[in-house]
Image (tube, coloured by chain):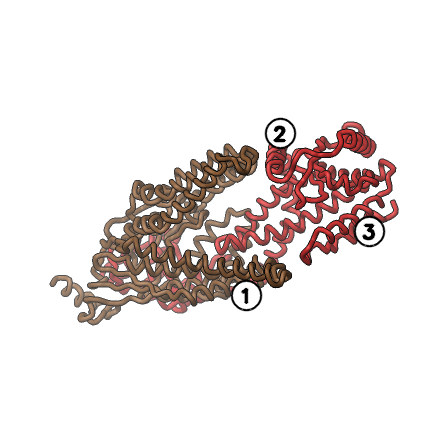
Chain colours: A red, B brown
Amino acid sequence: MSVAPRLQLEYFDGRSARPQRAEIQLQDGQLQLACGLLNHQYPLGSVRWPERQRHGQRQALLPDGGVLSCADAARWDDWARASGLRDSLTVRWMQNWRLVGTALAMLLAVLLMAWRWSLPLATEATLRWLPPALEQQIGSQALAQLESHWLRPSELPPAEQDALRQRFATLVAQAHPPGQAPAYQLHFRAASAALGPNAFALPGGAIVLTDALVQLMRDRPDAVLGVLAHELGHVRQRHGLRLAVQASLVSALAGLVVGDFSALLAGMPALLTQQAYSRDFEREADAEARRCLLAAGISPRVMLDFFERLAQQRQHAASLPIAFSSHPADTERKRFFSEPP
Amino acid sequence: MSNNNDRTAADSTLGNLSGWPHSQYRKRKLDVAFTGSGSEYFRIWIVNLLLSLVTLGLYLPFAKARRLSYFYSNTLIDGQALGFHGDPWKMLRGFLLLAVLTLAYGFAARFSPLSAMAAFALLCGLWPALWRAGLQLRLANTSWRGLRLGFTGSSAGAYAALLPLYVPAALMVAIQSRLAPGDLKPGDPVAAMLAFSMGASLLLMLLMLPWGVARIKRYQHGGYVYADQQTELTVPTRRFYGLGLKALLLTLLPLALLGALAAIAVAVYKPLLFWMMLALPLAYLLYFALITPYVSARLQNLVWNGTASELLQLQSDLPARPLAWLTLKNWLLTALTLGLYRPFAAVHTARMRLQAMSLMVEGDLDGWVARQSVAQDDAAGDAAGDFFGIDMGL
């Protein structure tokens, strides 16, 4: 290098707000700064160099608090290139539309992979790591919460409850090898009209069955067993806790993407993925119900009656035309349970 | 004046680089310009995001440093860009510390209400100190014309500014915990008492809020330092109440409208109620997309127009309605593009907010010198500010 290229710019010494005209060049691995009669030298590595961008000014930060400022970015970039200052890999990446397009594609791939594999895996790992006692505690808290607001003690005759309990225990025993059945507790409860015929599983293995559901299917107790087996599927796969863990992971991920923009927007992907995951969970639980029924020698087709009566019930109950209740998934579920074994 | 002699001598050697007509020394308006572009920030953002994701978040501080550098180098006050001096490696340290704390808190909160409560109380206790550290660090890492900005607010001041609002909040939390489900039945006098005191604390909170915000802003804007200039906020508290009242009215108006519409629907045409239910989430979003920027624009103007030091006077002339429309547009496009519009939105918002600002300066800036070099390396505070969305209000 015979003549090192020079650049005229403004220099602030870090002590005064006065801009001083200065000239810089790179020589012998040093940044040489000439300002009036003063000469400074800085090792290249000690200077914080600006990143190349299309917009904005260039500022190099000197280790002694001084600042080199070049309002004409193009002039700086020419000088930097001529002086052999190389852009970092990241900067070259960012300044090239084609590479940015690649980055976008990779980003989508990473997000897709995270959604498809990493998230369930991470959830799995977290679930394995959580002590079962904790799950029990969450479940009992949730049940207490529900009982105080929506549930009352069951009004079914104790004999009917015992009979169902007994039949379900038999079914569970038939469907699982000895010692492999998941632990569950069956609770009969009367519920407000809003819940209607319903059943749900809570973390820790609590299964709540409403009186209305038992009454709805009184002449088809096998269908009640099918519903319970579905809930047992949720218990076995720990779906309740899985959803909670997944929700926190998804919202953390979404927070990374649009979090500093709006918490509301960040909440939406979490909500949407939640829906998708819980649909998957319902399918898993349905598969479990079907398996259990078949193992107990009951035709899965008993569930068809249940879906039909539930649909009728909904039509009677809804005074307003609520569009959401026309479950397209119902047909899919009916088909699943009516398939020959 | 020796300063003038210096100047002429300097001018001849410097080629009049910084020369302003001497007659205009007395008072000068410095405009703020923002030159960033959405498409360029989009490229920076995509690569930052990808690197942050594949490093499981470890790249975040570096991404943040790059983002701030970009915005700073495009923020020109009187033609001179701001400088960002933050060290990403130090930011990484603070980030790791905070990530560990937040994860611990998240787990605690999900699985044991008691430990979550303890962690929350601890965070509340530390919060003012963290907030102050964040302000200090952010300003100390910002320079203009080679001089670092600074923040001189004390820790005690931060606690004094924030604690009054803790009182009604703590009351509400305490009452909430007494209102445990199952303990109380409707018609129970204790329940009625609790419900009443809940309402009373909420009212107290509402009444105190403008005063609390005024205290917070007074602390914040009373601690900014540039050269030997220390700012002060001289806005009377009643003006914060005026803004609060406007916000309240703007909230009540749509609610009243909605109530009236619902009443009409019930009386005249019931299916209308169904469509209203469908539109409700949309109305909710619309409300937040419009009201939040409206209030924040008014607040920015109120606060910055009242911020001045001996020789500096800040000005903000941010129109509320355009900001509200811009925000609505940003939300819509961000949602429609599944987040890809976000960097454009950030740039547009920054441009509108920053270009509304200006500075009036008395005297010759060239003569201003740094008060002292302030070195801060408490990056935890900055990371905390970032985590919890606290910033300088700009």
Amino acid at circle 1: Trp
Question: Which of disc 3 and disc 1 is earlier in sequence?
Answer: 1
Residue at mark 3: A335
Q: Can residue A94 be seen?
A: no
Q: Residue at x 27, y 49 (%)?
A: B373
Distance between the Cα atoms at labels 1 and 3?
49 Å
Q: Nearer the viewer, residue B228 or A182?
A: A182
Chain identifier of the residue bearing label 2 in the image:
A
Q: Residue at x 74, y 37 (%)?
A: A232
Question: Which of disc 2 and disc 3 is earlier in sequence?
Answer: 2
Amino acid at circle 2: Ala
- Crowding at mark 3 (Cα within 10 Å: few <14, some 14-19, many 20+): few
Q: Position of residue B384 (x, y in %)?
A: 43, 45
Q: Is residue B200 left or right of residue A244?
A: left
CB under 8 Å between callouts 1 and 3?
no
Q: Position of residue A294 (x, y in %)?
A: 85, 39
Q: Nearer the viewer, residue B144 or B289?
A: B289
Q: Is residue A2 above or below residue A232?
A: below
Q: Is residue B298 above or below residue B117?
A: below
Kindly report which numbered mark, 1 or 2, lies closer to the viewer in this rendering: 2
Quadrant of residue A79 within the rendered picture: bottom left
Amino acid at circle 3: Arg
The residue at the far top in this view is A179
Quadrant of residue A76 within the rendered picture: bottom left
